[in-house]
Image (cartoon, rainbow, N blue to C red):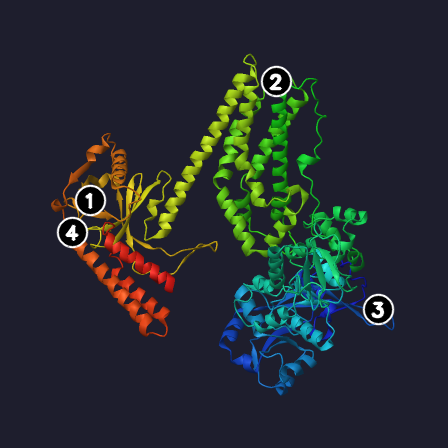
Amino acid sequence: MAENSVLTSTTGRTSLADSSIFDSKVTEISKENLLIGSTSYVEEEMPQIETRVILVQEAGKQEELIKALKTIKIMEVPVIKIKESCPGKSDEKLIKSVINMDIKVGFVKMESVEEFEGLDSPEFENVFVVTDFQDSVFNDLYKADCRVIGPPVVLNCSQKGEPLPFSCRPLYCTSMMNLVLCFTGFRKKEELVRLVTLVHHMGGVIRKDFNSKVTHLVANCTQGEKFRVAVSLGTPIMKPEWIYKAWERRNEQDFYAAVDDFRNEFKVPPFQDCILSFLGFSDEEKTNMEEMTEMQGGKYLPLGDERCTHLVVEENIVKDLPFEPSKKLYVVKQEWFWGSIQMDARAGETMYLYEKANTPELKKSVSMLSLNTPNSNRKRRRLKETLAQLSRETDVSPFPPHTPKSCTKSSKSSTPVPSKQSARWQVAKELYQTESNYVNILATIIQLFQVPLEEEGQRGGPILAPEEIKTIFGSIPDIFDVHTKIKDDLEDLIVNWDESKSIGDIFLKYSKDLVKTYPPFVNFFEMSKETIIKCEKQKPRFHAFLKINQAKPECGRQSLVELLIRPVQRLPSVALLLNDLKKHTADENPDKSTLEKAIGSLKEVMTHINEDKRKTEAQKQIFDVVYEVDGCPANLLSSHRSLVQRVETISLGEHPCDRGEQVTLFLFNDCLEIARKRHKVIGTFRSPHGQTRPPASLKHIHLMPLSQIKKVLDIRETEDCHNAFALLVRPPTEQANVLLSFQMTSDELPKENWLKMLCRHVANTICKADAENLIYTADPESFEVNTKDMDSTLSRASRAIKKTSKKVTRAFSFSKTPKRALRRALMTSHGSVEGRSPSSNDKHVMSRLSSTSSLAKRCV
C-alpha cells in the first residue's frame, strides 16, 4: 500500500493513539491525512486493544445516559505514525488513519480516583464520562492525560447513530465542532485562557493568527488588523459573551437546532465602542441617525464633544468644519455610517474621510471597490492569502461602482440632425429620448437595487428574504428586456431617419410582450410599495441600503418607490406621444394607419391591466372577508367569484339568528354570505410570514347560493318601519320556504338600489332575464316584523343614555377620579345597547347618543 505523502519516514513507529501523546496539531490534521487501508493491514500493525467507557460518580446515576451508552457500539480511534527525527529534536507525531473500534466491554462505574488504579490497564483504551468539568475528579483525570468526555457527547452520538468521537482534549459537548476561532483585543491573559478552555471543551479549534480557515473572530474591540481582515472577508465577528452563553446552554437539547439564531444574537454590532456626532443633517435625519446609532450598539453626543470618536458629515452640504478636529476624531462621510449598518460591521474609516473626499487617489480607489461579496474565484484567491497580504486590503469599501448597461452601451452612431427638422421627426426624437431615459431608470433599479439584494454571500447575510425581493421588483427585468428592444429599434429608425419609416410597427411588434409583462407589476405595485415601507421600518440594513443608493447620482435623489412608479406611468405617456406623432403624420404616409393600430394596441394593454387589476382587487376583497368572518367556508374562495356589495343590517325575525342581532350581508355575484357580529373577540391572526391581522369581528352563519332566493320583499316604509326588507328562500334541507327579514342600518346605500342589485345577480344566477319581477312590495303587517320589538330596542337605548347622563353628572360631582368613573359609566351604557342599535329614523335617540359621545370625548 502506498504511503501518504506526509509520512516521509519509512522507518517510523506506528501505534494506537492515546490522548497523552497528542497536541492540538494532531487534532487539526486528524481528518485531513486519512489512509484507506485494508482491514488485514490494520490488524497486523495495530495492537489488540479494547475500548471501555467508565462512568464517573454522578454520570453512573443517569438512566438516560446509561440507556444511550447501550446503543453505542463503536468508537473512533486514530492510528498515528511517529516519524523519527534528527538527534536533539522531538519525534513528530502524524495521523496515519482513523479507524472504528468495537466497544466489546460494557461500561463500568467509578466513584473515586482511587478506583482508577484498578481500572487502568494497557489492554483497554479508557474513556471517562464526567458530568462536571470543574471538580477535583476531573482535574485529576485531566492531569493523568486521560480521555474525558461529557454526557452531551454520548447523548448526541446515540441520537444520531454515530460513533464516539476522538478528541485529544476533554470534550464536554460538540456545539462548536468544526468551528475555528481566532481572538483579538484581549489584554487579560486569565480571561483569554478561560475562553480558550471553554471552546476546547465544546469541540472548537483555536488559531493564534487569522488565516483562511478561521470561521469566527471573537473580538473584544473593533480595531486592529484581525478585525479589519474579518470585515473584508465577511467573517462573523462575535462578542466574548457568545462563548459564555454557549457554555451555559451546553446541556440543552434544542441548542443545536437553534445554533445559527443563537450566534446572530451575539454578533459585534457595527458601532460598538463608537461615539458619534452628526453635522449638516436636518433635524429629522439627525434624529433617525441617532436612533440607528443606539440600535447598532453605539452612542451619540452633541457636536464638538471631546469624547466623540467619529464625526459623520453630510458632504453635499458641509463645506468647512466649524472647529479643528483632534487627531483621534474620525471625520467621515455619511456613506461610512450607512455602509457599516448595511455590512453589519464597522467599515474602515480611511476610505471615507471627509478631508479626502475630492482627491483623485480616493476616487480611483473607490471606483475599484465593490459592495457585493467578491465572486467565487476572487474569494478563493483571498482565502488562500496570508494575513500580511490580507491586511493590505483592510479598508474595503462596501459600495459598488455602478454604470447601467444601457449607459455603457455606445450608440450605433451619433444621431444625425436633418437639415430641416420636421415636426414628425421632433416628436419621434422625443419618443426615443424618453424611451432611452426610461430604460436607464429600469437599469438603475435592477443593477443598483435588485442585483445586490439577490446576490449570494452578502456581508452580514441576506438583507431581504427572496419572497420580499420578488414582491418588490416583480417583473421589472422582463419590462426592461422589452423596452431595451424597443429603444434599440427606435435608435435604428432615428439614425436612419426617413419620413416613410414606420414607428407604429415597432410598438405593434412588441404589443404581446407588453401585455405579458406589465399587468403582473402594475397590479401589485401597491403591495410592492407597502413591502418597501414595511421592510425599511423593520430592517435597519435595508434602510441603510436604500440610503446609500438613493444618494447616488444615478437615482437623481429619488427613492426606490419613486423609481418603481415609472412603469405605471410609462404606457399612458407613450400613448400620448404616439397620438402627437399621428397628428404630424400626413394622411398619405403608410405609418398613419399603423400608428392608429399601435395606439389601439396600447389601449388594449392598459384595458387588460385595468381588468386584471379589478380581478386582483376583487380576489383581495374575498380574502378580506375570509379573514374578517370567523368560520367562513373555504369554498368561498373561487376564481370566478367577486364581491359586489356589503350591507349592515339588524335581524327582524327568528332567522337567520336571534331578533335584534347585528347581521352583515356580503353579496357576491353568485352567493350571499350571512354573518353576525361576534360577542367576544379572541386574539389576533398571525400569518406564516409574521404579518398580523386584526381579530375576526364577525361570526359565520350561512353561505347561501343566490339560486335559493325565491322572492325579494320590499317592505313599505311606515313611521315605525324604515329600511326593512325580507328574503323568501328555499334551502335544500327544508321542506318549506324560510323568511329572512332585515333592517338596513346605514343610509349610504339606498334600499331601492340594494334590492335592484340583489335581484339582478339572483336573475343572472338562475338565468332569468326579468330581474324586476323578483321584487314584491308588501306591508309590514303581512310579515313577522314586530315593530313593538323595534320600539322596545329604542326604549332600552334611551334608558341607557339617560342612565349614562346621570352617572356622568354623579361622577363629576362626587368622584375624585371623574375620568375613571366616566369610563365605567360609558362601558355600562355600551353593554346595555350592545347588539341593540336603534333605527336611524329616531332623531331624538341619535341626538342623545351624539351629545353623550361628544361629552365623553371632551372629558376622557
* Residue 26 place in picture, x, y as percent: 73, 67
Q: Amino acid at mark 4?
A: Thr
Residues at discs 2 and 1 in contact (Cβ within 8 Å): no
- Residue 350, quarter of the rendered image: bottom right
Q: Is residue 695 above or below residue 116?
A: above
Q: Amino acid at mark 2?
A: Lys
User: Which residue carries the number 2 mark?
Assistant: 501
Task: Indicate which label's residue lies in the foreground, 3 or 2.
Answer: 2
Could you say whether the residue bearing mark 2 is in a helix, strand or loop?
loop
* Gap between marks 4 and 1 measured at Cα: 15 Å
Q: Earlier in the sequence, mark 4 or mark 1?
A: 1
* Gap between marks 1 and 3 measured at Cα: 105 Å
Q: Quadrant of the C terminus?
A: bottom left
Q: Which mark is residue 787?
A: 4
User: Which residue carries the number 3 mark?
Assistant: 85
* Gap between marks 4 and 3 measured at Cα: 111 Å
Q: Amino acid at mark 1?
A: Ala
Residues at discs 3 and 2 in contact (Cβ within 8 Å): no
Q: Residue furthest right?
A: 87
User: Which residue carries the number 1 mark?
Assistant: 726
